[in-house]
Structures are given as C-alpha cells and as structure tokens.
Image (tube, grey):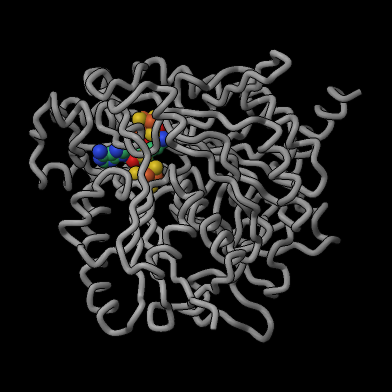
Amino acid sequence: MAPKVYIETVGCQMNVLDSELVAGSLKRAGYQLAADLATADVVLLNTCSVRQHAEDKIYSTLGKLRRWKAKGSGRIVGVLGCMAQKDRELIRQRAPHVDVICGPGQLARVVELIEEARRSGTPQIAVSLGRAEASRAEVADSFESYDPLREPAMRPNRFQAYVRTQFGCDKFCTYCIVPSVRGPEQSRPPEHILAEVRQLADQGCKEVTLTGQTVNSYKYVAGDGRIWRLSDLLYAIHDLSGIVRIKFITNFPRDMTQDLLEAVRTLPKVCRYLHVPAQSGCNEVLRRMKRLYTVEFYREMLARCRDTIPGVAISSDFIVGFCGETEECFQRTCKLVAEAGFKNSYIFKYSPRPGTKAYDLFADDVPEEVKRRRNNDLLAIQNRVSLSEHRRWIGRTVEVLVEGQSKLAHKRGAIHGDRVQLTGRTMTDHIVVFEGPLSLTGDIVPVYIEDASSFTLFGRRLGPESENAHRGLESQAASEKRSAVAARVG
Ligand code: SAH
Ligand code: SF4
Ligand code: F3S
C-alpha cells in the first residue's frame, strides 16, 4: 500500500508554497496525502521561526507526535522549514524521535531523506550553510532552488497559486530571523517564473500571487544584459492567456519604485492592492529596526502609491513593544495607523530572536503586559479605520473571484437549497461574502455591496442584466485601465 503523508504548515506564504511543492514531489514518488494523523505513516511539520510563539507550538506538537509515533511501527516524523534550518541541534535534543530535519534550502532532497529514514531507521538531516559560515556565494549555493512541477491537486484550489520570485532576504532588519533561516536574496530567472505561470495557466489557474520576502526588490540580470524588475515580470505575465489576476507580496517601502506603481495602474489584470509593512510610526524605532526609511519617507511613499494608482488598497504590518519603544514612540505609530487609511494591518508583539542584531544589541525592555496593551490599542484603531475604509464600498459593484463556501456559512445556517454563503476577494483584496450556488467557485462574478464590517464586505450577486444598472466604481476603474492598456499597446 502507498505510504500516506500528513503535512502541517505554519508561517508565511513561502511555507505554504513549499508545502505544496513537497506534497507534489511526494505524490510523484508514490505517496498519498492523508486527511489526518490517524491514517498517516509520515507526518511533516513545515515550521516558522519568526516569533517564539510559533516555535513553542511546534515543540508542543512534537510532544504529541512522540506518542503518535510510539503507537505504530515505521512511523516517520519530519521537521521542515525555518526551524529546521535554525535549530537542528535543539530539535534533536528536545525531540529525539524526529527522523527528518530538512531546511528550506534543502527541500529538493526531502523525498530522499524520508525514504532513507524509513529504510535505515536513522535520523536524516539536511540544512544549508549559516550566513557567517562561508562566503555569500557559497551560502547562496547551499540554499538550492526548489521548483519542481506544480500539482494543482496539492493546492486548496486549482485556480489560485503562489509563484516564487525570490528566495531569501538581504535587508537584515534587526528584529528579523528570516535572512538567517532563508539565506541570501536570490531572484529566480524570469524564464523559470514565466514557464511556471504558463504551466499553471494550462492547468486552469486564473490567479497568481508572486511571492518574495521583499518582492519589489526583484532584480535579475539576463544573459543578454537586460535587467528584469518586478514591473517587467508583471508586463510579461500579463500577456499570458488564462491568467486573469496577478498579485504580489510583500513589498519593502524603499523599493516601491515608480515603474512598479505605473505597471499596477496600467495593467488591468494586476490587483490594485499593495502590502507594504511600515513596522513602526516612530523614526527612532525605525532606526533601531534598521528599516532604512523614516516615517516621512513612508508617508510620502503612500501618497505616491495613491496618486499613481487611483483606488489602490494598502495594508501594513506593525511590531509593538520593540526595544526602547516609549509611550511617545507608540503614540506616533497610533497616529500613523489612524491617518494612513490601511485596508488592514497585521500587528505583532516584539519577540526577541537569538541570532538577530536586536537580540545582541538592545534590551527587550517593554514589559509583556505593555506589549499586550499596545497591541490591543493599535488593533482597535486599525479596526475603526478598516470599518470606515470598508464602508466606502457600500453601494458599489465589485468583481469577486469566488474562493468557495464561507466559514460563516455553517455557523449562520445560511444554506438555502443549492445556495450557500460564498466568499471571495475583489481586485483590491477585500473579502466579500454573498449568497450563491457553490458551482460559482473559481468564477469572477459581479457583487453589489450592501454592508460592511472591519474585515468583510457583504453583498448580493448581480445577474448579467442588473450589472449595468449598478455599474460601480470598480467596474469603471477596470474599464478605464483596459482602455489605458489598449492605448499603450496601440
Ligand atoms: N518580508 C516581509 C515580512 C517578513 S515576516 C517584510 O519585510 O515585510 C512578517 C512580519 O512578521 C513582519 O512584517 C514583522 O511585522 C513581523 N516580525 C518579524 N520579526 C518579528 C519579531 N522578531 N517579533 C515580532 N514580529 C516580527
Ligand atoms: Fe525580515 Fe526585514 Fe527581510 Fe522582511 S525585509 S524578511 S522584515 S529582514
Ligand atoms: Fe516564518 Fe520562515 Fe516565513 S521564519 S515568516 S516561515 S520565511
């Protein structure tokens, strides 16, 4: 019987993509996916090190997996991803029952490692070089590119997919472990990216999200000397038939160049949505974080995004309670959030990471309860801003790519015959919930927005005849963009 594998994933979009690729490689090697632990022979945890909390949860799961492993013979436990790269020794000490440890730069070997662990019963370990262990080029080489064939069945749905543009990060923000665990920033050759998107389109994929830790820093010098930027990639992908939506995450504020903003304005398939984390609204904190910009620069960048791309939605990340953050500093962050009009923000309490500059240089001097209070306060401000930002959509018609049944559907008992509560996203990344048949999943449909909360727009699906009657701003903007492209091409 084919061995069954169960993969649990935490962390960012990089890990989600890696898990899909690992599942695809295992499937081609004869494995099946297990729906749960009980029926699995191999359990893989794809891990994240960005905050202590994420690591604690993995150690607690590993504790449970010790009992799981003892209950059946030949069972295999694997730790993949960023924790594997960062803490192989610690994992061996704290969880000696782990059979496979494989860093994110070694995933091309994961099938071989699992097979070897099953055959020999001895632990298998593959990690890349640490950033200080060798020259930049050698370390970069040890983070091998992993881009096997895509397997639509391994994604939550076949019409949306992540596509990697870069590995690693070179920004070295002082709080962040990512440059250590993901290695040097390396942009993938554009022809690989385009071939992958073409393959995805052939498999029925409609929306691609280009991913990189700082996706807008993408830069590749081709053999003919041509320099490819993210904007060039957007134009090239835009020409591929079958793909109807293109997104990209995450952006670094300093690299938000005008060519990129103009590509977003011009290309109708590119979502008018930018995730550009600010991290703090205080220059003193930004300097200690080594973010390389000031609040004034960030605000000016936001204004440039909004001037260039009418109707663009912008989201952000913030860290509260970073080393030396005074109440005054925090109030500056509150002011930024109150004024910037973000669609949403992800807010995190600072978590000191051994191996980062901040851990070595600065005291983690903001008490936990102050971090918690600041987190709640900032969230409350963002929620108010999000609500008014969302309410502006009431009375407009938006185009929604339907992702499936909403999580609320069961809770609210809102199933009427073949109609369920569906959820999807707009071109500005807003979540929309509305009623309709499940068969709409994967389609783009016009929805008239009637209500809004801080997180969600609620609407009514329009039939083709009522579409014109309610033609709202989004449809207008899309058709303006279409004529802009026609003009450019012409
Ligand atoms: N590359 C992306 C995000 C990387 S990690 C970027 O540069 O924007 C995702 C988010 O986690 C970061 O934006 C930051 O807000 C948060 N984060 C990173 N390190 C952290 C730490 N040590 N403690 C708390 N939050 C952290
Ligand atoms: Fe971390 Fe900064 Fe790189 Fe983002 S840009 S991954 S926050 S070091
Ligand atoms: Fe976490 Fe690694 Fe992503 S540390 S945020 S999974 S790059």
378 to the left or right of 423: left
Q: Is residue 133 above or below residue 33?
A: above
The residue lying toward the viewer, choosing from 12 and 437, is 12
Residue 158 x, y percent position in the rendering: 67, 61
Residue 317 x, y percent position in the rendering: 37, 38
The residue lying toward the viewer, choosing from 68 and 172, is 68
149 to the left or right of 179: right
The residue lying toward the viewer, choosing from 40 and 360, is 40
Quadrant into which the C terminus falls: top right
What residue is drawn where x is 16% and y is 59%? 94
What residue is drawn where x is 21% and y is 69%? 63
What residue is drawn where x is 35% and y is 17%? 292
30 to the left or right of 389: right
| Residue occupying the far right of the picture | 490
- How many callouts does the rendering have? 0
Residue 286 x, y percent position in the rendering: 28, 22
What residue is drawn where x is 65% and y is 46%? 208
Q: Is residue 440 above or below residue 50?
A: below
